[in-house]
Amino acid sequence: MSFMTEVSSLTGRLLVATPALADPNFDRAVVLLLDHDEEGSLGVVLNRPTPVDVADILEGWGDLAGAPGVVFQGGPVSLDSALGVAVIPGEEGSAPSSPRSRPRPVRGEPIGWRRVHGAIGLVDLDTPPELLAPALGSLRIFAGYAGWGPGQLEDELAEGAWYVVESEPGDVSSPSPERLWRAVLRRQRSELAMVATYPDDASLN
């Protein structure tokens, strides 16, 4: 427990690759951290779409996946496994307009969805899609994930490899994932907004 008093959990935050990060797996990557504790960290890269349609590999889930409806490469670990991340709208602070017209409130979490942070959660892809369909606001399917052992991410942060920023529910389902790196940096109220203008070819800077 003493470790966690020194390293507060970053679960639900975004790791945004700095221009100095040399690993090609994470060049201009935006990683949503799904788990971060003393045993290590796990996340998915939000801006690596593949040419593979979700419908081609997961029957029934294709219609629920937001545009572009393709599988994303979540990271270099376990590329043969699929992981679903979804946003449940109205989970925080939504007030119905009238008692008569309001939908039946969801007690607890929808079946097949486990909250990670705020309105963002993990989807059990063994759940029948039709059970989750009414509750889902957006869904992304990832092949593989990014993983760090105990203390490994902290070392990379100390080396300046990542910026840590707050996530927004829309980041998971960005319709323009190729622009996400710049978009996330641009919305920061700090010098990070200037990094968004960094050229793709560092030699041009």
Image (cartoon, rainbow, N blue to C red):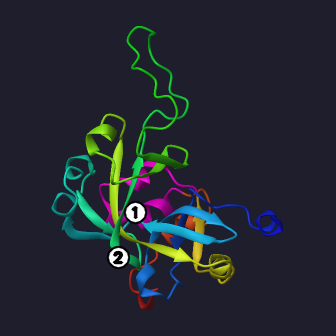
Residue furthest to the left in view is 56
Q: Nearer the viewer, residue 125 or 70?
A: 125
For label 1, the crowd category at 10 Å Cα-Cα, with few meaning under 14, some 14 to 19 and many 20 or more, is many
Q: Is residue 103 above or below residue 22?
A: above
Q: Is residue 162 above or below residue 159?
A: above
Numbered mark located on residue 148 in the image: none
Q: Quadrant of residue 102?
A: top left
Residue drawn at x 43%, y 60% is: 183
Position of the N terminus, as image quadrant, is bottom right
Q: Position of residue 111 (x, y in %)?
A: 41, 40
Q: Position of residue 19 (x, y in %)?
A: 50, 81
Secondary structure, mark 2, is strand
Residue drawn at x 27%, y 51% is: 65
Which amino acid does the dot numbered 1 rest on?
Answer: Leu
Confirm whether the magenta stretch covers residue 178.
Answer: yes
Q: From the image, give the main secondary structure of the stretch colored magenta.
A: helix
Q: Position of residue 131 (x, y in %)?
A: 31, 38
What span is colored magenta in the figure?
A: 166-187
Which amino acid does the dot numbered 2 rest on?
Answer: Leu
Residue drawn at x 37%, y 67% is: 47
**Which residue is tagged 2?**
79
Confirm whether the magenta stretch covers residue 27.
Answer: no
Relative side of 177 to 145, left or right: left
**Which residue is tagged 1?**
180
Q: CA distance from mark 2 to mark 1?
A: 22 Å
Residue furthest to the bottom in view is 203
Q: Nearer the viewer, residue 88 or 82?
A: 82
Q: Quadrant of residue 6?
A: bottom right
Q: Position of residue 76 (x, y in %)?
A: 41, 80
| Mark 2 in CB contact with mark 1 (< 8 angstroms) | no
